[in-house]
Image (cartoon, rainbow, N blue to C red):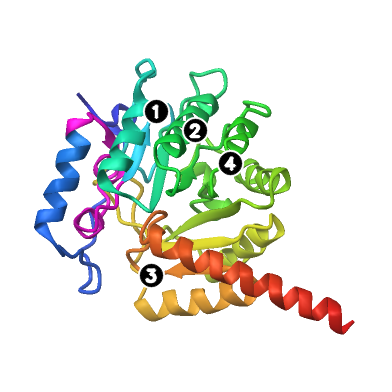
Amino acid sequence: MIRHPEKINKPSNPIKKKPKWIKSRLLNSQEFFLTKKIVNQQKLKTVCQEANCPNITECWSKRHATFLIMGDICTRACAFCDVITGKPKNLDPLEPFKIASAVKKLNLRHSVITSVDRDDLEDGGSDHFYKVIIETRKLNPKTTIEVLTPDFLRKGDSYKRVIEAKPDVFNHNIETVPGLYRQVRPGSRYFASLELLKNAKKLDNSIFTKSGLMVGLGENKDEIIQVMDDLRSADVDFLTIGQYLQPSVKHYPLERYYQPQEFDELKSIAESKGFLLVSSSPLTRSSYHADEDFAVLQKNRIKQTNAQSISKESN
């Protein structure tokens, strides 16, 4: 099967050699293979595999996996993504139970669930997200749940079904700066993604909201800062910033690798904007260290709430 039929006739873009600071780590091979075994036994898909995530060895060695629901075939054709593009198959009605069972077997404290875009479905897959969240929580009442959703573009209020299930974290990645959307995310709309994040927070402000941004696609610093401001205007709590890694010569060309100190600078700028948490490094991805980050998010919210209470009392 051709993974990206829409890219066959595109010009080839040579892949730049990775710098020394971009390398993944294998921490515990026994745990890695245990995670792989459980995923395979349940016949599940993970974004770790389908998107060729550079952190798969590290995360799976910690029994962390990001589950990919609603199949492994996406209806969009984003220029940066390595997930298969094409006509998806029917939804698996047993998938919610399979995900919940895998979370239990892996003994996860924090689970991350994402999906391909399903523009072919009337609700964009929001009801399936709801069922997966509900089933996972039923079987794992102490496990916190993070979802990374598509944009539900032109699906009306379908996103509300996901919020109704009360995930602990609602994540939707903005991915890149608005000026690059036509080339990088041709099937998506920058302001629609912002509106989704804003509306999710309005609907239930107890849920943490989160978004991610790739760098190295040709954006400039001012454009990145504008995205930060836009996300804060949407009341987003958590921002992740990571290096774009070009999957193949047919994917969107990488312009440059950011230096580690540049990620540190972007983190400082973002923190000054008021995000509860910022993760910024070459290998940062949406679900990288999600377990540890969620614990920090909770602590930071408590600190923020206490500080606001003291401020009100003093006034």
Image location of residue 288, percent across then percent down: 36, 59
Q: Nearer the viewer, mark 2 or mark 3?
A: 2
Image location of residue 193, percent across then percent down: 60, 44
Q: Could you say whether the residue bearing mark 3 is in a helix, strand or loop?
A: loop
Q: Nearer the viewer, mark 3 or mark 1?
A: 1
Residue, x 20% and y 66% (percent of image)? 23
Instruction: Name the residue carrying label 2.
Output: 134
Q: Could you say whether the residue bearing mark 2 is in a helix, strand or loop?
A: helix
Q: Residue furthest top?
A: 90
Q: Are marks 1 and 2 in contact (CB under 8 Å)?
A: yes
Q: Could you say whether the residue bearing mark 1 is in a helix, strand or loop?
A: helix
Instruction: Name the residue carrying label 4.
Output: 166
- In the rendered image of this protein, does residue 55 appear above or below residue 142? below
Image location of residue 234, percent across then percent down: 69, 54
Q: Examine the rendering and report whether any part of residue 78 can be seen.
A: no
Instruction: Name the residue carrying label 3.
Output: 281
Q: Which residues are magenta?
A: 41-65
Answer few, some or many: residues within 10 Å of disc 3's Cα (few below 14, many 20 plus, some between 14 and 19): many
Disc ID at residue 96: 1
Position of the N terminus by quadrant: top left
Residue, x 53% and y 46% (percent of image)? 172
Q: Are marks 4 and 2 in contact (CB under 8 Å)?
A: no
